Structures are given as C-alpha cells and as structure tokens.
Image (cartoon, rainbow, N blue to C red):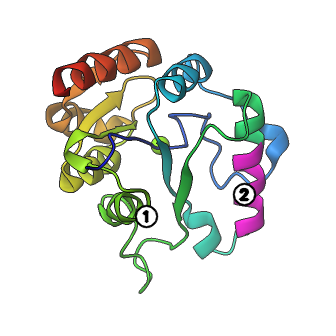
Amino acid sequence: MGKAAVFLDRDDTLIENVPYLGDPAKVKLMPGAKEAVATLHQAGFPLIVVSNQSGVGRGLITKEQVRAVDAKMEELLGSRKVFTAFFHCYAAPGDPYDEKRKPSPLMLQEAARDHHLDLAKSFMVGNRLSDIQAGQAAGCRTVLLHLRIPEEDRAEASRLASIVALDWKSASDWIFKQHLEDL
Ligand SMILES: [Mg+2]
C-alpha cells in the first residue's frame, strides 16, 4: 500500500521566483511556507519537490547552482531532511528531452515508483496551470496556491484545481482534512 505524499512546486510556491535563480543568497521563502512544510513533514507526509528548471537547458545556470538554491531553501526551512526527494526537469521547452517537464505527470509518476507513493491519495501544490495539470494527470488532488499565479494561468488553473488556497495555512489545512477523510 503506497503512502500519501505532497508534491510541491518550488518557485513562487516554496520560494520567491527569481527567473533562472542560481544564487543561493537570493533565496527567500514564500509567506507561510516554513510553517506549512514543517506541519506536513511532522504529520508524516513524504514531501517531494517537483520543479521545472529550464535555465539549465538554456545554458543560463548549472545543475550545481540549482542544488545550491535547493540547499539554501532547506536551510531556511530549518531542516536539511524535510524533503524526501527533489525532481527537476532541466530541459528548455521544445528540447528533445523535455518529456518530463510539467505539465507532464512523469516526475510525479517516477517519484511514486521510487518512493512507494499512492498518487490517488497524494496532493500537488503549485502556483501555475502546469502544476495543476501535472498533478491532475498523475491522479492527485491539486491545490492552487493563490500567492503568485501568473495572470495568463489564473482562470484555467482556478477552474481545474481541486481547491484554490489563499495562503499556505489554508492549503495545508485542506490537505489534512482530505487526508483524514481518506483514512
Ligand atoms: Mg511555480
């Protein structure tokens, strides 16, 4: 029996989006992310970061820089062990190797195989339409975090998401409520 996990987009969900961020000094947590991540982690959810990092495929940043930013994020969250795994797609849109890029569900499906997760009992939290589409295609419930949704994504993402959460507290509260109903 697989576990219920929470998949998390990184940029503008966990940390403020700086396009093609490679400098750990510029990492800032999104409001409420630290508390929500700690609560979900303490409750026993595997937390999996699922992120498109096309800056690597575009030659603007390196994989090492992406890892340095991830490490800084973990430091700011107060734990280096809070995430079960990181899945990044480094390809630029249109690359021959971009098949894992969200909105594809492939990174979530790979994580489910690697970590024995039950996708139907899991959740995807993100700020973009592609996060919601990836989560939905993987069979997860989806939470659209209403902190920084790109204008062009807003209508469709709001329509498709299982819930639109105005802040991280409401997102984690909703996840807990759904999870309890699954038990
Ligand atoms: Mg994002």
Write the residue at 58% across / 18% down. Answer: 31
Which residue matches tag 1? 114
Question: What residue lies at 44% left-to-right and 81% top-to-bottom?
Answer: 95
* Range covered by the magenta-colored residues: 63-71
Q: Residue at x 39, y 70 (%)?
A: 100
- Secondary structure mostly seen in magenta is helix
Residue 62 versus residue 44 in the image, above or below = below
- Judged from the image, the secondary structure of the residue bearing numbered disc 1 is helix
Q: In which quarter of the image is residue 15?
A: top right
Whether residue 61 is visible to the viewer of this picture, yes or no, is: no
**Residue 105, x across and y down, in percent:** 29, 61
Give x and y (percent) for residue 127.
Answer: 40, 36
Q: Depth check: 160 or 168 in front? A: 168
> What residue does disc 2 label?
67
Image position of 135 (left or right of 93): left
Disc 1 marks which amino acid? Asp
Q: Residue type at mark 2?
A: Arg
Disc 1 versus disc 2: nearer the observer = 1
Q: Is 50 colored magenta in this rendering?
A: no
Q: In which quarter of the image is residue 170?
A: top left
